[in-house]
Image (cartoon, grey):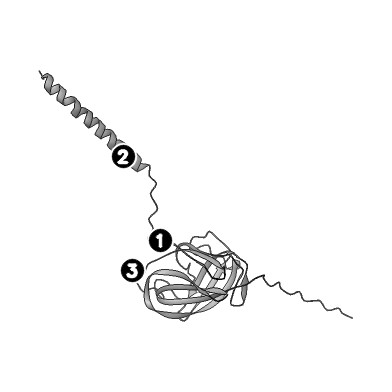
Amino acid sequence: MKSYSNLTLSIPILFLSICLSTLQSTARILNDSIVKPQVRSSPIVIANLKTTENNYVKCTYGQPLKKGREIFGNLVPYGKLWRTGANEATEITFTNNIQIGSTQLPAGTYTLFSIPNKDKWTIILNSELGLWGDFDYDATKNVLIYEAPVSTNSDIYEGFTIQFEDVSNGFNLLLLWDTVKVTVPIQKIGELEKPSKKKKRRRN
């Protein structure tokens, strides 16, 4: 038969055990209810710039890493369409009307594709948004095709990087990875030029 003193000692221990078990169960429930962020091997990065002339531009892209690999001509083949990043297709937003080369574009958001080559890249802006990579690329929705020369960086960029550089009356779009640098000059413009209507000649 148990003594009264032993019974008295057992009650607090039992109570503590119940409390500890309840706390552990509650902690498991709370931990299971926490929505954890998605882990990506290529993180989402936002590059943006507000220039001295009140131009604002923003680019959202997935950033793949070099990881000791040969990038251009291997991981990213020459002569083939590239999403210009990783995961979802890269999107760029202009808050002003712009001009790249001889092409004028209204302010808005576009998808950025490219075709890398050793000496030059073909830069493509497309009106279709919300794409995954370049799988649903539709060339009929291209609004800009521009040839940009390739130069060499003295620094090695471990991650693919998009930057903007403030220049007079616009900015430069910089595409950087490994030792490769591609510069796309972008000019701010006012009203878009309307295509001239040719008058029809009257026949006598």
Q: Earlier in the sequence, mark 3 or mark 1?
A: 1
Density class for disc 2 (Cα within 10 Å; few <14, some 14-19, many ≥20) is few
Q: Is residue 195 left or right of residue 71?
A: right
The kind of residue tagged 2 is: Ala
Please give the residue where the numbered disc 2 appears in the rendered image. Answer: 27
Mark number, residue 74: none
Return the residue nearer the eye: 137 or 9.
9
The reply to whether callout 2 and callout 1 are in contact (CB within 8 Å) is no
Return the residue nearer the eye: 142 or 77.
142
Mark number, residue 43: 1
Q: Is residue 79 visible?
A: no
The reply to whether callout 2 and callout 3 are in contact (CB within 8 Å) is no
SS for dot 3: loop
Q: Residue at x 61, y 77 (%)?
A: 102
Density class for disc 3 (Cα within 10 Å; few <14, some 14-19, many ≥20) is few
The residues tagged by marks 3 and 1 sit, at their Cα atoms, a distance apart of: 14 Å
Mark 3 or 1: the one toward you? 1
Reply above or below: 7 against 198. Answer: above
The residues tagged by marks 2 and 3 sit, at their Cα atoms, a distance apart of: 38 Å
Please give the residue where the numbered disc 3 appears in the rendered image. Answer: 67
Q: Residue at x 22, y 31 (%)?
A: 16
Q: Residue at x 65, y 71 (%)?
A: 190
Q: Quadrant of the C terminus?
A: bottom right
Reply above or below: 79 against 87. Answer: below
Q: Earlier in the sequence, mark 2 or mark 1?
A: 2
The kind of residue tagged 3 is: Lys
Mark 2 or 3: the one toward you? 2
Density class for disc 1 (Cα within 10 Å; few <14, some 14-19, many ≥20) is some
The kind of residue tagged 1 is: Pro
SS for dot 2: helix
Quadrant of the rendered structure where residue 69 is? bottom left
